[in-house]
Amino acid sequence: MQLFRSGTHFDFIGKKKFTLWVSTFAILLSLGSIVYHGGLRYGVDFAGGLLIQIKFAKPVDISEVRSALDAMGHKDATVQEFGGENEYLIELEKKSENLEEIAKTMAASLQERFKGKGLEIRRAEVVGPRVGKDLKTKAMWAVGLAFLGILIYVAFRFHQFAYGLGGIVALFHDVIVTYGAISILNLEYTLSLLAVILTIIGFSINDTIVIFDRVRENIKKVKKEDLVTIFNISINETLERTILTTGTVMMVVLILFFFGGDVIHEFTIALIVGLITGTYSTVYIASPVVLSWERYIASRGKRKKSL
Amino acid sequence: MPRSLLWKLIFYAAVSLFAILLLVPTGTTQLPRWWSKILPTEKIRLGLDLQGGMYFLLEVEAQKAIESYLEQIRSSLQEGLKERNIPVTKLETEKPGQIVLEFSGSKDKVDRLLSEQRFSMIRELSSATLSGGIWRVVLVPDSKQVEQIKRNAIDQALEIIRNRVDQFGVTSPEIARQGTDQILVQLPGITDTERAISLIGKTALLEFKLVDEEGNLEEALKGHIPEGDVLLYQKAVDPRTGAVSKIPYLLKERTLMTGAYIRDARVAINPQFNEPYVTLQFSDTGAKLFEQITSANVGKRLAIILDNNVISAPVIQEPIAGGMAEITGSFTMDEAKDLAIALRSGALPAPVKVIEQRTVGPTLGQDSIRQGITSILISAVLVVLFMIVYYKFSGVIADIALVLNIILTLAALALFRATLTLPGIAGLVLSVGMAVDANILIHERIKEELRAKKTIRAAIDQGYYRAFSAIIDSNLTTLISGIILYEFGTGPVKGFAVTLSIGILANIFTAVYVTRVVFDFYTLKTKAKQLSI
């Protein structure tokens, strides 16, 4: 089977002025949202605090849970529906050394208050302030190292600074936009979402490399064309593969989204956003960056387009 | 067929068979007896989020070990000074980690005292004369000694906690040191948070102190505690109403004996009231010491104190030889058992604080497993179908690789005793999606070559050759991410990194090598003129 019978000849690169605006808009929107909200909504993993997932055997409305928490003095606790019927997630962000105690009393009070409703504690997490802070530092290191590792690898494989630069700029774009989506959709930034960011980094560069690999090959093969045309040809040639792969991975992630349950729900949402921007950035960020850089270098003197 | 092809086929078939065998223990509960003799029996380990259980991160407050060490030196110093009749105006431990001594008279006597062996690990930080002929000397412990104490405290705490968890009887617990002063504890299947924390986190310092019979309890309660005394409380629960009250005791501060002398502790049941209590067996030195203490104090009350809470304070009726004692105190069976475990394993050298704790109930675990398996099955089926529809027979070959990929990843998890978590299942699903990419790259290349009118053999060759570098590059970069995530992640996220990374490695193997062999085999056997792709 073949999606495109006789090969496609879309002028992808030509659209780059338009897409540059789209990308700039996306990045500004993302950064704006993050600044507006004063940072990301850190989950208990990073901010410290406690989390309790409860389930009732008999019907209990969310407002009852909220008022029960208010009565205990926990006005700053958040309650949301989670999982199945009569199942809720209570979160209390707090930097305190006595979270154990607070969690214990909260659980006991809830049991008292809802006696007879079959309260079951499905899961509970307590994270002290120092642990949260440690994790935030680790997270930054992780993302930084991933960038560095990939930059080194791409530079090593493609021998020319332009390609490494293109890949990294695309990565930056993807990471910013994904964080932006997390902020706009008000997802909770937990360790799982950090995992998504790192996965997206891997996936995005993955995608970029496939195109660059083709470009490298075509430069050797089609000596007479200019770089822009070569890029277009390469993207067109790999279009089928790009659509199929992104499509397959997207399909798989959508299955996780629908069937994977609430615990990994936000994880899959972030993944979907990352996949889209990862594919997009290969064509409309990485490639234009390479082209611009090459043009800049060429304008500064003679330079062979060899790899 | 060429020898190399045959060998490759045999090798890959063997690997697949081995992988399947590795997975059998996970699938069944009954293995035939001969199995364990020749084949691995590891089931796949499930993370806490899938099987339910508790996870703690404990921080050892090693600083407190230093403080209690300093306190020991201080009282030793006090005795020494009294023996030599040196008039002392002040002898106190001060933060951070110093002993301040003020005395009058000649410093030589003090210097000679300090040069004794038992004070070899402290040294003078500063000394000055104050008005009135009073010397002020500040003593600190040797910094190497401090480090040593801290390290020992943590090592000891790790041992003791491991001991306690062992005795608690948890299947496959995990206790490990994390960083410099943290201990990680995982207890699968346990969900009684309070009990687990109190067993593991309890310092369990058992002390025997005399009750101060002459002291005025009422005055003490108002805040006037006599010199050398201390006020501690006993928690009493009224069995009928369940009301909790605190009974004060005025005790002599000096600890006559600690739980360090306990050789064994057991739970027994008082047949009269059907109440559990704990019997202690002291070591030989402990037994002698206990005999001395009880002989010297017949008629007085000896308070038994656990972590600064009075458990009971029975009257010493007669000297107790034989080194046995009982601790009674309205315990539940669980409380008595746990106390016995804690006493047997020894007191923690420094308190531990729970800085992170996660508990997953068993029902959530089961739900998560169900959701995870559903996701894998549906995505596997859809992807398999897609490959067949799109690539026809070549799709079938790719599907074989895919299924093998999943089997290999799971087998690797079992073999390396890695843990499967819910995000881990997501990682598996993800790597299936990405695995398809490699096959797509190869197939698209083969199609291109076929379109350029190459022969089937040549097309396959070129297809693999050309696609190879892109496959390696893209998989390796995702692998870099996976490894970094493994290093920095904890718990469920680590599980994600593991399955993603292993999945990628398995993918390179199956997509590139295994499918190639199948293609070669097929073209050789069928001598087809057209490739179904």
Image (tube, coloured by chain):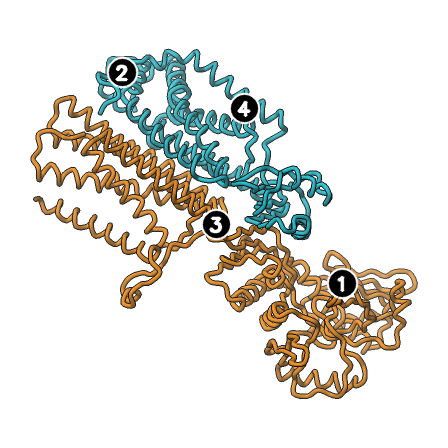
Chain colours: A cyan, B orange
Q: Which mark is residue A30?
A: 4
First-in-chain label (4 vs 2): 2
Q: Secondary structure at mark 1?
A: strand
Could one spot residue B526 in this view of the protein? Answer: yes
Q: Amino acid at mark 2?
A: Thr
Q: Which residue is mark 2?
A: A8
Q: Is residue B458 left or right of residue B511?
A: left
**In the picture shown, does residue B343 fall above or below A299?**
below
Q: CA distance from mark 4 to mark 3?
A: 35 Å
Tell me the chain of label 3.
B
Q: Secondary structure at mark 4?
A: helix
Q: Is residue B143 left or right of residue B403?
A: right
Q: CA distance from mark 2 to mark 3?
A: 49 Å
Q: Amino acid at mark 1?
A: Val
Q: Which residue is mark 3?
A: B365
Say which of A113 and B201 sits in front: A113
Q: Which residue is mark 1?
A: B244
Q: Amino acid at mark 3?
A: Gly
Residue at image position (25%, 24%) is: A217
Say which of A61 and B281 sits in front: A61
Q: CA distance from mark 1 to mark 2?
A: 81 Å
Mark 4 vs mark 1: give the one in front: 1
**In the picture shown, does residue B314 fall above or below B219?**
below
**Residue B194 position within the rendered picture, expressed as x and y whole percent measured from the top left:** 62, 58
Q: Residues within 10 Å of mark 4 (few under 14, many from 20)?
A: many
Image quadrant in which the N terminus of chain B is located = top left
Q: Is residue B315 left or right of residue B485?
A: right
Mark 1 vs mark 2: give the one in front: 1
Q: Which mark is residue B364?
A: none
